[in-house]
Every structure is written in C-alpha cells, then in structure tokens.
Image (spheres, helix red, strand yellow):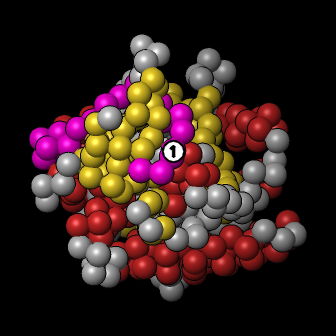
C-alpha cells in the first residue's frame, strides 16, 4: 500500500491551495478528486478585491467591477470604488490553474478517484476504470464540499445549509447586481454577475425550506422580469454549508465548505476555501501556527449568521431587516467589502 504524509480528499480551491502550500514545504501529498475534471462547480464566479482578485493571474479575470448595485423591495443603492470591488472568473479555468500550481510545487493530483471509505490511517479508493485500491495517510484533509465524506466520517452534522441555483446564459450585461427580493427569496437574494461571454443569473437562500421546484419557478419568474429568458438554459444547483464546528480533529482536518466556512448571508465560499486550505497546510507543517486567518473568518461568519437568524423570522421582519441593511449601505454606515464579503 502506497503511503503519503497527507492525503487531501477533494480538488476544489480549498484542497488545491492546501496541496500547493504543503508541497512547497516539501511534504509528500496526494490529492484525490472524484470528478474527471478539476474545477467544475455551481458558482456565480465572483471574487473580491480583498480576497482573490490580487492573487490570481490577470488572464483568469473575465470581468471586473468598480461598481455594485443592490436592490431591495423599496430601495436601490449603487456604490463605487477606484479599485475593483468584485471580479468574475470561470471556475474551471481557476481550477486548472490551481491544479497546475499545485503539481508544479510537487503535489500529486489524481482525478476520477472516488474515496469510498475512510479507515484508520488509510482510504479505500475506486478509480474511473473501476479499480479499487488503498492509500495510507499520516494526515487527512477533507476538502470535499458541503456533503463531505470526511466530515461524515468524523460524525459532525451539517444543519446550517443553504442552496444556490445558477443559470449560465450566453450574452452580455453591463452591471453587477444583487436583488434582495424578500417576496421571492426571503433572507436570500437574486444575482446578475456578468462574465466575458456569459451572464450568471441565479439565487441563493440560507435555508433550504422552499421545495426545489418552487425555488426554481421563483428564480425563473424573477429572471424573466429582468429580461432573461432561461427556458433553454440548464439549471444547476448546489448546497452550501455554513455550519462551522471546527477544522482540526487530531490528524484529520476540514477546509472550505467541508468545514462549513462559507458565508450564511451571501453564500460566498471561494475565498474561505482557499484561505482555510492554506492555513490548514501551515498548521500541519507547524503545529504551533495560530491559524489566525481561520479565526478571523469565523468571527465574520458569526456576524453574518446573526443577520441570517434575525431575518429568518416573519416575512415582515425579514423585509424590514433587508431594508435597514440597504439603508445603512446607502448612508455608508456599512462597508460592503468590510462587512458583507468574507
């Protein structure tokens, strides 16, 4: 049985950033991704200036925006900055670049490998040819998303889950928009995120209480009111885990959505995944590392959670809270980048 110092389950941004950081330090690391292609995920593709825009190659940026438009039932706010606030990227291109960086650093990356079972110090894997084999590990990192097998192996429940639904339509659109339509999405929102040749049109809701069929109908009705006919565009949906209960469990670790580090308010997950992946890698390399970046993210996530909880009550309370949030943005008493992004 082949053995590795660290095995990472999951080839998203969290797993790939963890693999690269470990490999750069000379750690022998294997990353296993069940899909054949790295990078695919249901995602609006937005990255923030404070988060990733400055950390990825310029050629990966599809569109960048110095202006954000936020609409509520009764108000509209448009705020501008000199530097880009949010940019959009293609998740597959980001994944390929991150994979290449990890491999360049010395990490081994295998796609089409489904981890079937986790046992003490080894995992049982089936590859795309149907061959089953075991790999030994000294440390195990779960970077396998909201339905994480590694999290389930640790018997950690995931009770705070949201859902995002996205349509990637051909065409162009000038503005990046957020729509806090409480009648349709309650304490979630609809979005319009322009890319280079497509537009991401979707919606997010912190609770999954709306049946998927009804949620889809609401999104399609709202999109049509914005001028987007999506009848022939395939819908994609993804669960988003914001139920953080820790990231270090002996020799087993969790990062990104597997750790529940997404924002319950916005559903943002790319930046938390990458930061937590790098932080866990440094903690594995040096157990005395304080993991301060994760602590900061958890503090911000808890603030977001308080807003989500307050808005989860009656429809009237939800609407009043969202209107108050937009009013505070209009009065510049809340900073979008500082308070609402992860």
Q: Quadrant of the N terminus?
A: top left
- Horizontally, is 71 left or right of 192 in the view? right
Q: Residue at x 73, y 36 (%)?
A: 216
Report which residue position mark 1 lands on: 118
Q: Please, which residue is most extreme toward the bottom here?
A: 333
Q: Residue at x 48, y 51 (%)?
A: 120
- Horizontally, is 246 left or right of 49 in the view? right
> Residue 100 versus residue 42: which sits nearer the camera?
100
> Residue 217 versus residue 309: which sits nearer the camera?
309
Q: Quadrant of the C terminus?
A: bottom left
Q: Reply above or below: 141 against 174.
A: below
Q: Please, which residue is most extreme toward the top here?
A: 129
- Magenta extent: 101-121
- In reply to whether residue 302 is colored magenta, the answer given is no
Q: Secondary structure at mark 1?
A: strand
Q: Residue at x 42, y 44 (%)?
A: 122
Residue density around tag 1, few if under 14, some if 14–19, many if 20 or more, within 10 Å:
some
Q: Please, which residue is most extreme toward the front here?
A: 1
Which quarter of the figure has residue 117? top right
Residue 269 horizontal/vertical position (percent): 47, 56
> Residue 242 versus residue 57: which sits nearer the camera?
242
Residue 339 horizontal/vertical position (percent): 48, 77
- In reply to whether residue 104 is colored magenta, the answer given is yes
Q: Reply above or below: 21 against 221.
A: below
- Horizontally, is 291 left or right of 183 in the view? left
Which quarter of the figure has residue 310? bottom right
- Residue 124 seen: yes
């Amino acid at each position: 049985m082949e053995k590795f110092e660290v095995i990472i389950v999951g080839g998203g941004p969290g797993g790939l950033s963890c693999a690269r950081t470990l490999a750069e330090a000379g750690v022998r690391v294997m990353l296993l991704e069940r899909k054949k292609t790295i990078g695919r995920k249901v995602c609006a593709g937005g990255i923030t200036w404070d988060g990733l825009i400055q950390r990825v190659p310029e050629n990966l940026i599809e569109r960048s925006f110095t202006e954000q438009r936020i609409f509520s039932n009764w108000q509209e706010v448009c705020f501008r900055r000199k530097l880009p606030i949010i940019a959009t990227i293609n998740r597959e291109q980001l994944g390929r670049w991150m994979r290449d960086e990890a491999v360049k650093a010395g990490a081994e990356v295998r796609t089409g490998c489904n981890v079937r079972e986790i046992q003490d110090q080894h995992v049982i894997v089936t590859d795309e040819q149907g061959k089953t084999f075991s790999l030994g590990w000294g440390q195990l990192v779960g970077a396998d998303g909201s339905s994480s097998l590694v999290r389930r192996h640790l018997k950690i429940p995931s009770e705070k889950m949201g859902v995002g639904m996205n349509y990637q339509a051909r065409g162009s659109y000038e503005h990046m928009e957020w729509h806090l339509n409480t009648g349709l999405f309650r304490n979630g929102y609809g979005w319009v995120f322009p890319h280079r040749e497509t537009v991401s049109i979707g919606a997010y809701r912190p609770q999954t209480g709306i049946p998927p069929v009804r949620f889809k109908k609401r999104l399609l009705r709202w999109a049509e009111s914005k001028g987007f006919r999506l009848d022939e565009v395939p819908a994609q949906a993804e669960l988003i885990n914001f139920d953080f209960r820790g990231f270090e469990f002996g020799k087993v670790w969790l990062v990104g959505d597997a750790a529940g580090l997404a924002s319950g308010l916005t559903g943002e997950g790319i930046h938390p995944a990458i930061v937590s992946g790098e932080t866990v890698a440094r903690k594995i390399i040096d157990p005395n590392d304080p993991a301060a970046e994760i602590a900061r993210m958890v503090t911000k996530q808890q603030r977001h959670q308080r807003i989500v909880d307050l808005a989860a009550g009656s429809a009237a309370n939800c609407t009043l809270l969202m209107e108050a949030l937009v009013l505070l943005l209009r009065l510049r008493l809340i900073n979008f980048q500082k308070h609402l992004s992860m």
